Amino acid sequence: MIKHFSLIFMLLCLSNCKDVKTTDPPQEDLGFFSLGEVKDYILFKPGSYWIYRNSYTNEIDTIVLQYCNLDTTYQESKLRKFSAEVITYMYKSKRDGAVYNSYVQVSNPEASNFFMVWSWRCTRIGGARTIYDNSNGDGCQFYYPFDSTNSRGNGVYSTTFSGRLGSLDVGGKIYTDVVAFSVLSDCSYPYPNKYLLSAGKSTYFWSKGNGLVRIVNDSWDAPNNGNQVHMVWDLLENKLN
């Protein structure tokens, strides 16, 4: 009798277990994310150019925007889906032929603590002036939302929002609505016509409606016990199409 009762109990348990179903949480639709004010800092038409002077070597460098595209990316995972504006562009140096490929990278929809962040990634190809230079480099020069509590990077470098400046005097010209980003181990800044170690520290200053108006870089002129070099690329003039 006890054996029969145990068998019946086990069958009832198995029957009940079959009715228990595990369900994934419903996918969250986050809708559309616009770049908003970011477009005033980094979205310009091809043919636009920026002319800079280097305080260390007195070189002049003209950066010409070759390609620029505003598009929408769609991202989806089991957790969430969304669409977001992104920008891709390429600009080239007339001084040394370096090409800078830049694109906006959005947050991963799989992230457990998701919030939307756009990272402005830049890869420099070429521009090395000596056999000791690394001709390619990568960095993050800008991200949004502007938040000093979070840094962006890929483990090699780290980029931090340094703050908003009401105005900035660059060569006697006042630029307004300026935001600054500090980059450790920056490998994508414009090389001067003099050997410097890559991966120095840079600060990028962006002005709304004008783009990049100043780059400050601190590096060294030789390995180990080299002399520290401080240089500034200041915007002399620009033409925005």
Image (spheres, rainbow, N blue to C red):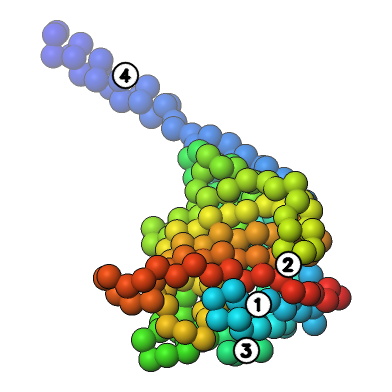
Q: Which quadrant of the figure has residue 228?
A: bottom left
Q: Nearer the viewer, residue 102 or 31?
A: 102
Q: Amino acid at mark 1?
A: Arg
State whether residue 124 is above or below residue 16: below
Which residue does the numbered mark 3 point to in the structure image? 95
**Residue 26, horizontal then vertical, whole percent:** 58, 36
The reply to whether discs 3 and 4 touch (Cβ–Cβ < 8 Å) is: no
Which residue does the numbered mark 4 point to in the structure image? 12
Residue furthest out toward the right: 241
Q: Residue at x 60, y 61 (%)?
A: 204
**Residue 107, horizontal then vertical, whole percent:** 56, 52
Which residue does the numbered mark 2 point to in the structure image? 171
> Which mark is in front, 1 or 3?
1
Q: CA distance from mark 1 to mark 4?
A: 82 Å
Say which quadrant the C terminus sits in: bottom right
Q: Amino acid at mark 2?
A: Gly
Q: Secondary structure at mark 4?
A: helix
The reply to whether discs 1 and 2 touch (Cβ–Cβ < 8 Å) is: yes
Q: Within 10 angstroms of label 2, few (less than 14), some, or many (20 or more) residues? A: few
Comes first in the chain, label 1 or label 2? 1
